[in-house]
Image (cartoon, rainbow, N blue to C red):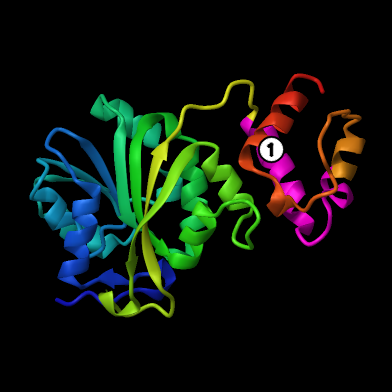
Amino acid sequence: MKHLPRKRFGQHFLADDSVIDAIVDAIDPRPGEAMVEIGPGLGAMTLPLLERIERLTVIELDRDLAARLRRRPELDVVEADVLKVDFAALAAAAGKPLRVVGNLPYNISTPILFHLLESVEHVVDQHFMLQKEVVDRMAAAPGCKDYGRLSVMLQWRYDIEAVLDVPPEAFDPPPRVDSAVVRMQPLAAAEGIDAALLGELVTVAFSQRRKLLRHSLGRWLEQRGAEVGFDLQRRAEEVPVAEYLALARALAAGG
């Protein structure tokens, strides 16, 4: 029986074999690795992955698709909302860090990325199909319009690289946007950083991105009584990740 894509789950199924092969080649799965696929759907990427590794854990919210996936004994099916999945627990159960892959639902891709950020210490790498606009923001350098909160909050913990552009016609149904595959490799956490504090200051900095930082971050620093040497005569998008980290470190140290 044909599965009809469900709009509420943001389902767009990969249907182009050459694109699928290119993605699996980019991932380069090896036997013995603990791999988790988010949103396997009809198994377009799942089956080629299984040709290279013995077992695969898949996370699928759609009850009908989860039932279909359970017919394959090589799959460990987690029927759940990915935002509620404990990736640290999955790594502990596997006895090794995870390689995480998937064609992420575009309507909740950013929350998924931030959820995974909480388990970054338990991950080898991540390869995701995303809206190209989101990949551009993730990988953006300071000084360009795509550079924002998402760029800073991911780049402080990952090396991010766009590896493949994917046109709408590679999907069924075709989305109205271009897509891209991104590779995310965890970086060691910078010392002395309170992640929650960093998140707060970056959110404040980009809350009025067209104005100079003295109007947003400057007032926030004043309210905290913080005295730090930080140039507020810039816009948020002009500040490199390293400088946001230095500010968070100074604040955490009582600056």
| Relative height, residue 146 to residue 202 (above, below) | below
Would you say 77 lies left or right of 120 here?
A: left
Which amino acid is tagged 1?
A: Tyr
Q: Residue 128: name its quadrant.
A: bottom left
Q: Position of residue 104 (x, y in %)?
A: 38, 59
Q: Which region is colored magenta?
A: 195-217
Q: Residue at x 76, y 47 (%)?
A: 204
Q: How many marks?
A: 1
* Mark 1 element type: helix
Asked if residue 55 lies in the magenta stretch, the reply is no
Q: Which residue does the numbered mark 1 point to in the structure image?
A: 244
- Residue 149, given in percent of the width and then of the height, sits at 63, 51
- What is the magenta segment's predominant secondary structure? helix
**The quadrant where residue 123 appears:** top left
Quadrant containing the N terminus in the rendered view: bottom left
Residue 67 in the image, given as x and y percentages of width and height: 20, 58
Residue lying at 33% horizontally and 75% vertically, measured from the top left: 167
Percent position of residue 150, x then y: 58, 51
Q: Is residue 44 visible?
A: no
| Left or right position of 127 against 138 | left
Q: Is residue 216 above or below residue 251?
A: below
**132 lies above or below 246:** below
Let me know if residue 212 is in the magenta part. yes
Task: Specify whether residue 214 is in view.
Answer: yes
Q: Nearer the viewer, residue 198 or 39?
A: 198
Q: Is residue 30 left or right of residue 240?
A: left
Q: Residues within 10 Å of mark 1 (few under 14, many from 20)?
A: many
Q: Identify the image quadrant of the C terminus.
A: top right
Q: Please state if 205 lies on the left or on the right of 31 as rendered.
A: right
Residue shown at 49% from the left, 44% from the top: 115
